[in-house]
Amino acid sequence: MTEITEKIKEHYKEHAKFYQQYDMPSQWKTQPIASKEPNLDPFKKINWKNLYDANEKYRLFYKEENGQIVWSYICVECKTNRGVKDVAEDVVGRIKTGDLQITRFAYADGYKDDLINDIQGKREIENALLDSKRDIWFTDVNMELDKDKDLCHSIKATWLSSKVTAVGSEVRGIWYCGDMKQEGMSPYEGIKIKKMDINSISKDECAELVQEIKDYKEALNSWSYDGINGNYGGPEKTWSTVEIVPINPNSEVDYKIVEKLPKLAKIINEITTIDKCTWIVITRVEPKKGVILRHSDIGHDSWDYQTKNGLKLGRSIRVHFPIQVDDDCVFTQVGLDGVEEDFKLKTGEYYYMDKRKPHWVKNNSENYRFHVIMDLECEQKHLDSMK
């Protein structure tokens, strides 16, 4: 085995910088980011060891001009048949033995076509009797980076779906270039936020409930900055919560607040029941400077539901019910397609929100933003309410 000297390390560190500087969409600089990593997810950040190992296995391909790397990619020939899964853990495509999988790529401006030509050359099958080419899979495309998607479009690849990283909330696309029909994403996976056709309390009753919540002094879990809101409420802690069904399954459910505040009970009971919720919380974001930093909610809840499964019967879904909000409070979400979209939610409405997708809030209004949020078991009536 070759000894890894400091000189070798430095060589690959410089190569890694090419990927790191490339893999930063400009919009990340203006979003309220929780991570201190410029590449958001440190586990997706290409480092020198990734490139050294790829090169040792003859998987690293790159081109230099005048001592500078102008394109680079990591490519492997697949040795087995297997399914490729997206954020919902659904198989969206099936890799065949002999297909090429490109896990990462980067290129300088003006070198896209040159990189594509090199990739196309790898598709050629030696000694083939027919004019055939290997299929290509791009399995880690940064969906918020236009240069990544431009290359996939130029090579005539088809976007199938995406994954979302729990750390850093990056959206990583799965693209396929070939002639086989692939499954693609499941129904509902394209939804970010959608109003539900379910009625509850009126806008006037919402205003009354806000005052009742302000006046209520007996909450088991009073306004706090603990847990996730402590991580994502910004340095000034502008996001706080009152938990009714705590996210920690060992904590006590606050039945009393629901009994004492009948309007709150109606919001819950019109759409679900307390025993079908893994989390119920009243959230408050401060006016003018209030923020919830970019994040995605992926993992396991207190019922051990796989919360990355999205809108599926029997799974955990998130529903927002704003009780005080105005148009200067903006909820932003990034879809599986990498497109950022602003939403201005309305008081007194139920909204399904795909919590797995990156999202954040900026409250520039003069008023606090109050929401009731529920993680609840998905039933057929919830799916029907979004048709």
Image (cartoon, rainbow, N blue to C red):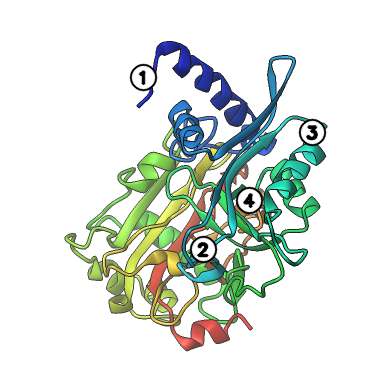
**In the image, is residue 60 above or below residue 262?**
above
- Residue type at mark 3 is Tyr
Q: Secondary structure at mark 1?
A: loop
* Numbered badge on residue 111: 3
* Mark found first going from the N terminus, 3 or 2: 2
Q: Position of residue 146 (x, y in %)?
A: 73, 44
**Residue 34 appears in the picture as rendered:** no
Q: Which residue is mark 4?
A: 330
Quadrant position of residue 194: bottom right
For disc 1, the neighbor class at 10 Å (few under 14, some 14 to 19, many from 20) is: few
Nearest the viewer among 359 and 371 is: 359
Q: How many marks?
A: 4
Q: Nearer the viewer, mark 1 or mark 2?
A: 1
* Numbered badge on residue 3: 1
Q: Secondary structure at mark 4?
A: strand
Q: Which residue is mark 2?
A: 86
Nearest the viewer among 363 and 302 is: 302
- Report the Cα–Cα distance between label 1 and label 3: 33 Å
- Horizontally, is 160 left or right of 237 in the view? right
**In the image, is residue 118 above or below residue 68?**
below
- Residue type at mark 4 is Val
Q: Nearer the viewer, mark 1 or mark 4?
A: 1
Q: Residue at x 49, y 60 (%)?
A: 355
Q: Position of residue 289 (x, y in %)?
A: 56, 36
